[in-house]
Structures are given as C-alpha cells and as structure tokens.
Image: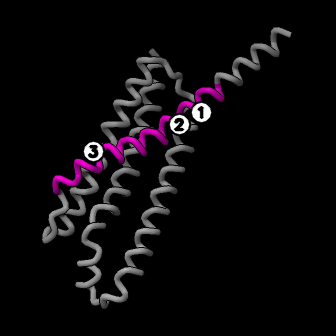
C-alpha cells in the first residue's frame, strides 16, 4: 500500500508541474493571431510591427523550448523513482494528457477573459490540441523513461557487482 501512495504522489507532482507549464505557455500563445492588431492599437506604425512580432515570437519560442527542457529534467527525476509497468504507464499517460488539455483550456480561457473583445476560443483551437499533447507528453515521457532505465541499469550493475 505504501508503494501505491508514493506512486500517487509522484504522478500528482508530475501532473501539477505539467499543468502549470501548460497553462503558462498557452496563456502566452493564445493571443498570437491578434499581435498585429494589438501592436497597431498600442501605437506602433506598420513598419515596426513585423520586427516586434519576430521578437515576441522568438521570446515565446525560447520560453517554450525552456519549458520543454524543464519538463524533461523534472520528469527525469520522477522517472528515477517511478517504476514503469503497463498499468503505471497508462495512468501516467492519462494523467499527463488530462493535465495538458486542462492547461490548454485554462490558458486560453484566462486570455479570453483578459481580452473579451477578441475571439480566442475558435475552431482553430482543435488544431492545436494534437500538437500540444504530442510535444508536452513526448518530453515528459522521455524524461520518465530515461530516469527509469537509468535506475534499472544502476540496480542491475549493483546486483551484478554483489554477485562477483
């Protein structure tokens, strides 16, 4: 029973971290289609808008890559303590998928509340769901698998060293 509680805490910790990162990144990305309008309303002239969009896109891309690396390292630590079996992998994938989807909806919802004059929730959000799920879950599972196999290899080498 104690092992099950430890697994639940580890999965809960990973799920909360993925949810937080997903909310923040989707909140940043939600208004990307409206950047030209927002910059024009802010008083920028047409010649200044493309460089500003480029810089903002570069910043969001850098933050997205950094958050993916953070998720990889965090889930590497989780994987060192989490035993991957078929049921535990299914539970982890389901919890990560739910947290990414909820983070997507909450991030876009927060931006919609901040900018009610623009329609953030459109059919185009359905296009983003597979990309969000694929990228975040791939980084998370890569970290878990690498951490798990590192632990398995260390245990195997320790057991082999004790036999000889």
Magenta region, residue range? 122-151
Helix, strand or loop at mark 2:
helix
Quadrant in which residue 96 is drawn: top left
Q: Residue at x 62, y 26 (%)?
A: 149
Q: Examine the rendered structure and indicate whether residue 132 appears above or below residue 149.
A: below
Say the numbered circle drawn on residue 146: 1
Q: Position of residue 25 (x, y in %)?
A: 37, 57
Q: Quadrant of the C terminus?
A: top right
Q: Nearer the viewer, mark 2 or mark 3?
A: 2
Structural distance between the alpha carbons of marks 2 and 1: 6 Å
Looking at the image, do the residues carrying marks 2 and 1 touch, with CB atoms under 8 Å apart? Answer: yes
Residue on which the image places disc 2: 142
Q: Residue at x 26, y 67 (%)?
A: 33
Residue 18 lies in the magenta stretch: no
Tag 1–tag 3 contact (CB < 8 Å): no
Question: Which mark is in front, 1 or 3?
Answer: 1
């Amino acid at each position: 029973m104690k092992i099950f509680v430890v697994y639940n805490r580890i999965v809960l910790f990973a799920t909360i971290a993925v949810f937080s990162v997903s909310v923040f990144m989707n909140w940043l990305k939600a208004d990307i289609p409206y950047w030209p309008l927002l910059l024009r309303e802010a008083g920028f002239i047409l010649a200044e808008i493309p460089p500003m969009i480029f810089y903002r896109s570069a910043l969001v891309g850098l933050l997205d890559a950094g958050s993916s690396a953070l998720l990889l390292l965090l889930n590497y630590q989780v994987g060192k303590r989490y035993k991957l079996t078929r049921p535990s992998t299914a539970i982890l994938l389901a919890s990560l998928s739910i947290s990414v989807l909820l983070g997507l909806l909450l991030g876009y919802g927060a931006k919609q509340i901040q900018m009610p004059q623009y329609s953030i929730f459109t059919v185009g959000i359905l296009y983003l769901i597979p990309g969000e799920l694929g990228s975040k879950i791939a980084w998370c599972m890569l970290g878990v698998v690498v951490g798990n196999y590192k632990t398995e290899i260390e245990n195997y080498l320790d057991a082999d060293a004790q036999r000889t």
